[in-house]
Image (cartoon, grey):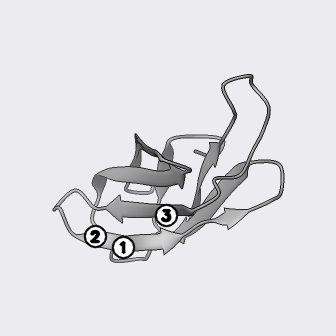
Amino acid sequence: MANSDVFTRGETVVCSLQVETNAGTATTPDTSYVVTIEDPDGTEVVDAATMTVDGTGELSKDYTIAADDVLGIYKVEYVLVHGVRKIIKQDTFVVQALTT
């Protein structure tokens, strides 16, 4: 995730993941890399979107929270395929009301 795991409507969440070999060297998955984001109601707001890769093994997908998006905990699922390995990682972030 970005700087914080708590966001408000209108902000952009940067879902990111660093991929490394067993030796700890940055790498890019050679087959596929997608991310799915599900809102607190279980609705997929991002459905298996391809992530951007920066050449150093860092994968990312920006998600801008709409003004009418549901408040609560969002689930993020990364699915990477590298050779014969399928890697699944999960994360969360919170969308809360703006406090003044």
- Specify the farthest residue to the right: 55
Q: Which residue is mark 3?
A: 34
At label 2, which amino acid type do we have? Glu
Callout in the foreground (3, 2): 3
Q: Residue at x 83, y 57 (%)?
A: 55
At label 3, which amino acid type do we have? Val
- Residue 4 is situated, as x and y percent measured from the top left of the image, at 58, 40
On screen, residue 64 versus residue 28, left or right, reads: left
- Residue 86 is situated, as x and y percent measured from the top left of the image, at 43, 46
Q: Which mark is residue 47?
A: 1
Q: Is 46 in front, or is 97?
A: 46
For the N terminus, the quadrant is: top right
Mark 3 or mark 2: whose residue is earlier in sequence: 3
- Specify the farthest residue to the top: 23
Question: CB of mark 2 within 8 Å of CB of mark 1?
Answer: yes
Q: Which residue is mark 2?
A: 44
Give the CA distance from mark 2 to mark 1.
6 Å
Give the CA distance from mark 1 to mark 3.
9 Å
Q: Is 85 in front, or is 49?
A: 85
At label 1, which amino acid type do we have? Asp
